[in-house]
């Protein structure tokens, strides 16, 4: 094998949302889905209570935090690793990616609404070359309308201008809207690299976020989201919590759990 520059998954984007039943893949490539899920990587003092439909509820014995909506803006999603070659697309300028040497492809922002009902949602489907992938890279991005793609995004999602994270819910029964302009690059090592072989069926990589730790201090106690707004005393703490909440793993059965952990017990 040879090591090549990063292959951008979105450079070979098939679709956002639902995937097609019979995708026409570039020759020699394999469909790979990128999904998103919510789950705790480790227990915290603010333990999850019974869910309220499409909400996440946390209680530390003093305060109650209910999250009704959690949304983030991602861009420039890439897979890195040692691959056998670069996918080759049609020799035209309308295929949505750069045909030359798998150069990095910069995408516009993508709004990801986190599933708060325990489900695993598909974000997108891409075509990747056979090989071994050991790192997922992306940006938490703050759209500002600097280019056509961002302008289009903001026309659909005007409440995300200058915002990359938006959370809606209640704090001790009082409604709140938390927004933050996190702008950070994320590089997530796949503990168990995903190995793609020519002829494989559709594969799935799940990005899981532990939102239980977003509004939690160093003692595991809940933080009032209003104290983490711009210039608030907990702004930097919550931003760090958000950036530390991501993990990614192979999840071909799309159950939100790492396939390397073994089959479900049920």
Image: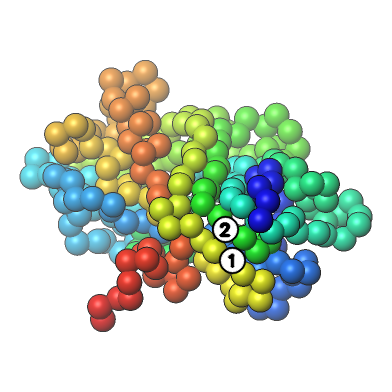
Which residue corresponds to the image point at 66% horizontal and 47% vertical from the top-left?
3
- Mark yes or no: residue 142 visible: yes
Measure the C-alpha gap from mark 1 to mark 2.
6 Å
Residue 140 point in image, percent of width and height: 51, 38
- Classify 10 Å Cα crowding around label 2: few (below 14), some (14-19), many (20 and above): some
Kind of element beneath mark 2: strand
Residue 210 point in image, percent of width and height: 33, 49
Rendered position, 221 above or below 31? above
Residue 133 point in image, percent of width and height: 56, 55
In the rendered view, does 68 fall on the left or right side of 77? left
Which residue corresponds to the image point at 25% horizontal and 78% vertical from the top-left?
265
**Mark 1–mark 2 contact, CB under 8 Å?**
yes
Which residue is tagged 2?
A: 132
Query: Which part of the image, by quadrant, shows the N terminus?
Result: bottom right
Mark identifier at residue 196: 1
Which residue corresponds to the image point at 16% horizontal and 38% vertical from the top-left?
220
- The front one of 127 and 178 is 127
**Residue 28: quarter of image:** bottom right
- The front one of 67 and 212 is 212
Query: Which part of the image, by quadrant, shows the C terminus?
Result: bottom left
């Amino acid at each position: 094998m040879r090591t090549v520059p990063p292959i951008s998954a979105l450079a070979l984007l098939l679709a956002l949302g639902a995937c097609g039943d019979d995708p026409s893949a570039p020759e020699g490539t394999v469909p790979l889905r990128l999904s998103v899920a919510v789950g705790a990587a480790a227990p915290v003092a603010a333990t999850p209570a019974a869910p309220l439909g499409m909400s996440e509820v946390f209680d530390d014995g003093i305060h109650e935090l209910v999250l009704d909506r959690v949304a983030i803006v991602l861009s420039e999603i890439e897979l890195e690793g040692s691959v056998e070659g670069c996918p080759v697309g049609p020799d035209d300028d309308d295929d949505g990616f750069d045909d030359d040497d798998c150069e990095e492809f910069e995408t516009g922002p993508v709004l990801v609404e986190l599933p708060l009902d325990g489900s695993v949602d598909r974000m997108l489907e891409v075509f990747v070359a056979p090989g071994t992938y050991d790192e997922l890279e992306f940006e938490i991005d703050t759209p500002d309308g600097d280019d056509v793609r961002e302008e289009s995004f903001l026309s659909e999602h005007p409440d995300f201008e200058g915002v990359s994270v938006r959370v809606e819910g209640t704090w001790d029964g009082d409604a709140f809207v938390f927004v933050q302009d996190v702008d950070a690059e994320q590089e997530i090592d796949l503990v168990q690299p995903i190995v793609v072989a020519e002829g494989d069926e559709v594969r799935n990589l799940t990005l899981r976020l532990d939102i239980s730790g977003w509004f939690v201090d160093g003692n595991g106690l809940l933080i009032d989201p209003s104290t983490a707004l711009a210039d608030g005393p907990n702004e930097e703490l919550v931003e760090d919590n958000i950036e530390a909440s991501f993990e990614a793993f192979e999840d071909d059965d799309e159950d939100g759990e790492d396939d390397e952990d073994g089959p479900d017990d049920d």
